[in-house]
Amino acid sequence: ESESSESESSESDIISRFQQYLKIKTNHPSPNYKQSSEFLISEANSLSLHSQTIELVPGKPLVLLKWVGTSPDLPAIMLYSHTDVVPAEHDKWDHPPFEAHLDSDGRIYARGSQDMKCVAMQYLEAVRKLKQWGFQPKRSIYLAFAPDEEIGGHDGAEKFSLSRVFQDLNVAIVLDEGLPSPDANYRAFYAEKSPWWLVIKAVGIPGHGAKLYDNSAMENLLKSIESIQRYRASQFDSIKAGLKAIGDVVSINTVFLKAGTPSPTGFVMNLQPSEAEAGFDIRVPPTVDTESLERRISEEWAPTWRNMSFTFKQKMYGRDASGKPAITKTDSSNPWWALLENAVQEAGGKLGKPEIFPASTDARYFRNLGFPAIGFSPIANTPDLLHDHNEFLHKDEYLKGIKIYESIIKAYASYDEHEIDERFKDEL
Ligand SMILES: CSCC[C@H](NC=O)C(=O)O
Ligand SMILES: [Zn+2]
Ligand SMILES: [Zn+2]
């Protein structure tokens, strides 16, 4: 009886630590990084982990923790997470997004419960358990808690990945976030799409709203939008037909439309405007022929002969320094992939087919520098509610994820290529 109440109380401690982190308002546009850093450092102290706060940009701290390995010269393991979260529309949630409400079913509602405060705390809880059991890592393990992923990572992962501090860590493998899986198989990502945020603008002759004439700004912009919608449908159709996965196609969505002549009661209704603009969030898989997409943009979607121009608010290429697609290998040339698959399996889970992440994560900065990076969040049987209202994680799924990380950290920190574990020999 005492045993069961003991394990119950430790489970509630684990959940309440998760809730504490979820309650810290690290939402944009002004994330409270001071509070999150203090919390993470106090967790580190309770685990006797060495901690360091790195402020590559003032007010944007990255907390770096270290568990020293017994063979500290072996390349290290990096357990990476971002501390910031996207904003939440409080009145559209069933439970306030920063109260981490645990409902009677066991669901924990909070902004960041899936993206990705869960992962951050699961790393720490797994380390706590491994330490309690007396496990000693062979490789050193770093835990990095970085700012600003949700706004592009420029003052976080980008600067960190290029810093002397990071280079000196001698990292072998980076683990970063993935996505929830609606079924029982976990999802794992070996690459990601690159963001192209495109704005196209049309100009044209203004005129009376009753007139029919060619080359108005609106007509020119709408022709582009029709063409973009056809392209979007062709990409989406190959997913709907089951021929391709979301990670393998170009996604393009219209995210703003800006046109018309404002009036006190809305817009002037009998005036065809001289300018019209639209914005698109495009995501480009790493192996797509970017030149042909660029040609499509300049020749079909924003051709100068139709009085159009375009700019990019963001444009990245998923390539490494040598120009090759920034892809982490999933074959036998990358032992970390097989180790992950095995470790997940030993903890009673299963990985689905390796995927390309449909959006952006900080992992791209490490992959572009040639480091292997795997996107993985141990969340199965859960709807993907990243950036959505009512983001939640069931406590049992959270607890299961800790076991998954215990297994991964054990396997990763023990892996020594000169002394291959017999169990994995076939797969490696
Ligand atoms: C391109 S920088 C923005 C990064 C952001 N990451 C997660 O959602 C994304 O929109 O993919
Ligand atoms: Zn995220
Ligand atoms: Zn996010």
Image (cartoon, rainbow, N blue to C red):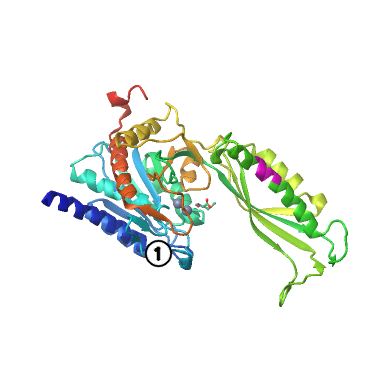
Q: Position of residue 404 (x, y in %)?
A: 32, 41
Q: Tag count in the figure? A: 1
Side (left or right) of 364 relative to 398: right
As for residue 407 lying within the magenta part, the answer is no
Query: Would residue 297 be visible to someone looking at this image?
Result: yes
What residue is at 35 percent from the left and 64 percent from the top? Answer: 35
**Magenta-highlighted residues:** 230-234
> Vertical placement of 219 versus 244: above or below?
below
The answer to whether mark 1 is within 8 Å of ligand 3 is no
Q: Is residue 19 above or below residue 175?
A: below
Residue 304, horizontal then vertical, whole percent: 79, 51
Disc 1 crowd, CA 10 A, few/some/many (<14, 14-19, 20+): some
Q: Is residue 146 visible?
A: no
Residue 245 in the image, given as x and y percentages of width and height: 55, 38
Residue corresponding to mark 1 = 95
Depth check, front residue: 156 or 303: 303
State the SS at label 1: loop
The answer to whether 376 appears left or right of 121 in the picture is right
State the image quarter where residue 21 is shown.
bottom left
